[in-house]
Image (spheres, rainbow, N blue to C red):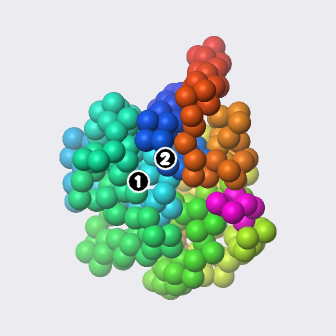
Amino acid sequence: MNTLELQKMAVEVRKGIVSAVHAAKAGHPGGSLSAADVFTYLYFEEMNIDPENPKDPNRDRFVLSKGHTAPGLYSALAHRGYFPVEDLLTLRHLGSHLQGHPCVQHTPGIDMSSGSLGQGISAAVGMALSAKLSNDDYRVYTLLGDGEIQEGQVWEAAMFAGHRKLDNLVVIVDNNNLQIDGAISDVCSPYPIDKKFEAFNFHVINVADGNDMEQLAAAFAEARATKGAPSAIVMKTLKGKGVSFMENKAGWHGKAPNDEEYAIAMEDLKKVGDALCQK
């Protein structure tokens, strides 16, 4: 896909996020929306995957370490063809394969169950090590929240990955600067994030705008070209990106829009999509 096509798809992914959380009357829209562009880039451009063969042993792997933003991952998977887009409206419903956090047993395209913050990166590191030990060439990607990296297990995993020089691993940090209780710098500051990963022997790529497809493309190309060290992409994003009343508001970390808010949100996204169609 070219940049414009990726931007248009990211709008559709965002519509899916808002629709799913509204239908569920629960969920986490803020961090799903901030990461919608990287979900789109990964699944439509970067990763070697096949929705027709989701268990292909040679596929690239993705672990959503910040598992509560499952609506974003589900929307990307649905639009990529892993399951019908209509399934998004069953989010968190009894009997649905789309539960509040990713479940590897029930949802096509999910490579690891996640939700307990801090644990997903460890699973991703294990997958990357497995590829090295087996001489497989698949790559492993994992997305962490900037609040999540306050967890100590994240840094144990990073220490191991750096020590083992797992250059088939890309750790992505969604740095929207907000967590459930407010600004990450107020709750328990993890800054400077880049210097911490550098201290654990990562090649660090800072992205000034993680909601910009061209900047994401450059970052992932640099990570792919990096040999002898794992890569950490630290991307600054806007929580609630694309929905006017959700943007940069910690209160929309884990809250569903009501009917009136849903209508406003979908109109906001429609305007963004219409503007892209004029390009």
Q: Residue furthest top?
A: 278
Q: CA distance from mark 2 to mark 1?
A: 9 Å
- For image coordinates 49% across by 46% down, the residue present is 26
The x and y percentages for residue 46 are 45, 47
Image coords of residue 248 (percent x, y): 73, 47
Say which residue appears at 71% left-offset and 33% top-offset: 244
- Work out whether 8 lies above or below 111: above
Where residue 81 sits: x, y (%)?
31, 36
Q: Quadrant of residue 257?
A: top right
Please state which of residues 96 and 218 is positioned toward the viewer in this rendering. Answer: 96
Give the number of the disc on residue 279: none
**Mark nearer the viewer, 2 or 1:** 2
Residue at the image point whose x is 28% and y is 72% from the top: 135
Decide whether residue 226 is among the magenta residues: no
Q: Within 10 Å of the Cα at label 1, are there few (<14), some (14-19), or many (20+) other Cα atoms?
A: many
Q: Secondary structure at mark 2?
A: loop
Q: Amino acid at mark 1?
A: Gly
The residue carrying mark 2 is: 26
Viewer-proximal residue, 171 or 122? 122
Rendered-image quadrant of the C terminus: top right
Q: Is residue 249 left or right of residue 49?
A: right
- Residue that carries the numbered disc 1 in the rendered image: 100
Instruction: Give the magenta range.
Output: 178-184
274 and 169: which is toward the camera: 274
The x, y position of residue 151, in whole percent, is 58, 77
Residue at (35% x, 32% y) in the render: 85
Q: Quadrant of residue 140?
A: bottom left
Q: Is residue 38 visible?
A: no
Q: Looking at the image, which residue sits at the far right? A: 186
